[in-house]
Amino acid sequence: MNTFVDSFRFMADNPHLLLVKTGEHLELSGAALGIGLLLALPVGLWLGHLHRGLFLAASVSNVGRALPSLVLIAFGLTILGVGFWNNTAALVVLAIPPILTNAYFAIDSCDRDVVEAARGMGMTGRQVLLQVELPLGLPFVLAGIRIAAIFVIATATIAAVAGGGGLGQIIVNQASYGLGGVVAASLWVSALAFLAAMILSLVRRAASPSPTPVP
Amino acid sequence: MIVAAGPVIPNFGSGSSCEVNNGWFCTEWVRQHWSDTLQPALFQHIELAGIAIAVGFVIAFALALAGFRYRLVDPPIGIVSDFLYTIPSLALFQILVPFTGITLLTVEIALVSYTLLILYRNMIEGLRAVPEEIVDAARGSGFTRAQTFTRVELPLALPAILTGLRVATVSTISIATIAPFVIAKGLGQPIYAALSQDIFKTEIFTAGGMVIALALVADGLLVLLQRGLTPWVRA
């Protein structure tokens, strides 16, 4: 239990260090999640809209789960060298599968009758996707983004072994920060991941259609 | 920054020219170190993941039984397992160390925690998806509650349960790679050692490839099991 007392003392003594590391952590995670969204979301949505690429969507998520974060970071380090980009690349690879797969299935599983009706009203393919299918599938799309965010924040911690900044740097450096510091940073990064997951849960709830009373 | 090199130190200097120059892939090194490094790490990895999956499955099953029978306990179990799932693995290890020390137990507790959400969700949703008419029919034809569960509800939920087992197995094999941050075991160990030895490429690619291959093979075996146990489901 003493370790936890030490860890809270560490937090009280080093608020600046923890804030700087949190900033780095968010920068790395945010960049990876942003790039992952830009790459995976349009592809997933569009394939779902066309009802094509089931095999791709399913295998991307299967293979994605099998890729260990430490392996991705080690590969990134070997191929791209030390720096911001090797870690970002590894994190992007982890963020893509849940975003792409969920986006695909969210759109693919939309009620066909509703889509037909929208088409019958003269909507173009793009309008159907953006005004009908996307709002209907949004909760599931957001669930994928939430999983991606959890993965990315967790793996950004491990990125410290490959010269990435962030809270992981304190966690893997017990020699400098002591067990109290290590535990403090661990609690801090857990809170960060929990907060991100919670915010995305709330967004998801807000995006879910509430049952409308029938007049 | 990078500490704790394992027993595996790539032999820069006295090996082949490929090893000396840290070439992209030195088959010779793999051949030389298969039996003293790679194979033991592979077996340890299977052990680490196997224990976690077995224990996680038993706990999740007990929780699913409770959550299925008593709807009141379902939300708290869901929230706790979801909360455990959000904790970054490296952080969970370090938070556990003050309690359980630098031990296998620490690693297993963390690995088990990550299996719970996936296994529990799939079990409970599989059980709930069983049509009520079928359960009523079983009860009507004289099945006891226990018989209805073991002979009707459980078999019908099996496809969902096995899908959960596949996902949990692949993720656990993947997460077990970071066990060396606590104890020097599993395929993460050679990777970790190679990172601290001037990034020895051959070792990283071999051990990394082995983890991915192990996950895919385990997944393939479970697909076969799924086909054998639930032949009525067309994959």
Image: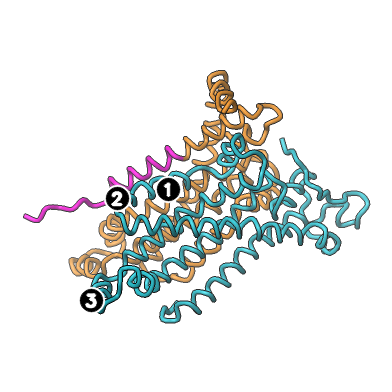
Packing grade of label 2 (10 A; few <14, some 14-19, many >=20) is few
* Kind of residue at badge 3: Gly
Q: Residues within 10 Å of mark 1 (few under 14, many from 20)?
A: some
- Considering every residue shown, the one lying at the far right of the view is B14
Lower position in the chain sequence, tag 2 or tag 3? 2
| Cβ–Cβ under 8 Å for marks 1 and 2 | no
Q: Which residues are magenta?
A: A194-215
Q: Are marks 1 and 3 on the same chain?
A: yes
Q: Nearer the viewer, mark 2 or mark 3?
A: 3
Marked residue chain, label 1: B
Query: Which colour represents chain A?
Result: orange
Q: Is residue A31 visible?
A: no
- In the depicted structure, whether residue A146 falls above or below residue A47: above
Chain painted cyan: B
Type of the residue with mark 2? Leu
Colouring scheme applied when the structure was drawn: by chain
User: Residue A77 in magenta?
Assistant: no
Which residue is labeled 1 in the image?
Answer: B82
Label 1 or label 3, whichever comes before in sequence order = 1
Q: Which residue is mark 3?
A: B140
Query: Residue B146, percent across and down?
Result: 35, 68
Residue A52 makes an appearance in the image: yes
Question: What is the secondary structure assignment of the residue under circle 1?
Answer: helix
Q: Disc 3 is attached to a residue of which chain? A: B
Which residue is under mark 2?
Answer: B72
Side (left or right) of B18 relative to B61: right
Does residue B114 lie above or below B101 as drawn? below
The residue furthest left is A215
Q: Position of residue B147 (x, y in %)?
A: 35, 72
